[in-house]
Amino acid sequence: MNTSEDHGIAVWVQIARAHSRILNQVEQALRQAGLKPLGWYDVLLELDRAEEVGLRPYELEEKLLLRQYGVSRLVDRIEKAGYLKRVACADDGRGQKLIITKRGKLARQKMWPVYRGVIEETLGRKLSNTETADLATLLEKLTM
Amino acid sequence: MNTSEDHGIAVWVQIARAHSRILNQVEQALRQAGLKPLGWYDVLLELDRAEEVGLRPYELEEKLLLRQYGVSRLVDRIEKAGYLKRVACADDGRGQKLIITKRGKLARQKMWPVYRGVIEETLGRKLSNTETADLATLLEKLTM
DNA sequence: TTCATATACATGCATTTGCATGCATATGGT
DNA sequence: ACCATATGCATGCAAATGCATGTATATGAA
């Protein structure tokens, strides 16, 4: 009931507001550019980083904080678009490797400037470089 | 392409991660307690603050950053649960006033300690009081 | 080896969301 | 008063999501 605890709620409320605003802007910009939703970008980025080795669905789940069934079906859609391929996993008969395709890399490359543009514009308008850096530091502590 | 811009993306990524984690925790806690989702709380809080005067749906839309159809249907559900009533608007034939009921107030009161508990625990574990206050200040600048 | 349990992933079904559109009243110009 | 346009809210339909459960392989203990 003291001051610091009240700040806790304030932090959460602001996180939720910031998240909502920024996400809306990004999704709208992607949509207007005829591109895929942000979730696709996240997956493609991780797969791109993983190179030809690929990632297991459960790894994606952990990295992106998604639910198991969420990954399963998101991957379905991205696969149908031809942006990734599912390959049976050599050392685990239950599993599979997700590997980005050429077209997937292309798609991610097209999304990046739109995505980045919105973020920089949104944040740049509101915060100085120092404030942005400070904010990043504090948020990292929070999500560690 | 400079350092400050990279922080911008970092800030966004951390906001998204923090949001995801915290929201999951809150929703899970509410669910386990047999309570309604967080969206219901937000609506009930605003209506509670508005007292017997109530709020127009479009005001809720602005306050909570929801879409028009989102409000329309969320209000449908909350109304069906008996937590609010829709009243034709006196000075605008198109509109209506949303007014919280006794049961709605009760429902919000039950949700609050669960909600608050998760937030305080989640944030308290990771940040000092000073850091929490600083974070609140920076985020407020961002969402202003 | 055999069995119990855990892990990886998929899926049926209900609920929620997004998008586009519809309907009714309000408002401002003529 | 009349019309064009704007505002407030609802809703049909398709897509996405949540939850529970199913199937198959893996792992470890006996």
Image: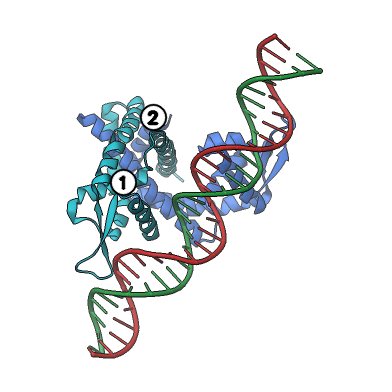
Chain colours: A cyan, B blue, C red, D green
Gap between marks 2 and 1, in whole Å? 27 Å
Residue located at (52% from left, 53% from top): B37
Residue A135 position within the rendered picture, expressed as x and y whole percent measured from the top left: 30, 36
Q: Are marks 2 and 1 on the same chain?
A: no
Name the image quarter holding residue A3. top left
Q: Which residue is mark 2?
A: B141
Amino acid found under the numbered disc labelled 2: Lys
Residue located at (29% from left, 41% from top): A107
Q: Which residue is mark 1?
A: A42
Q: Residues within 10 Å of mark 2 (few under 14, many from 20)?
A: some
Query: In the visual, does B74 lie left or right of B19?
Result: right
Residue C2 position within the rendered picture, expressed as x and y whole percent measured from the top left: 29, 90
Regarding mark 1 in the picture, which secondary structure is present there?
Answer: helix
Regarding mark 2 in the picture, which secondary structure is present there?
Answer: helix
On residue B46, the disc is none
Let me know if residue A143 appears in the view.
Answer: no
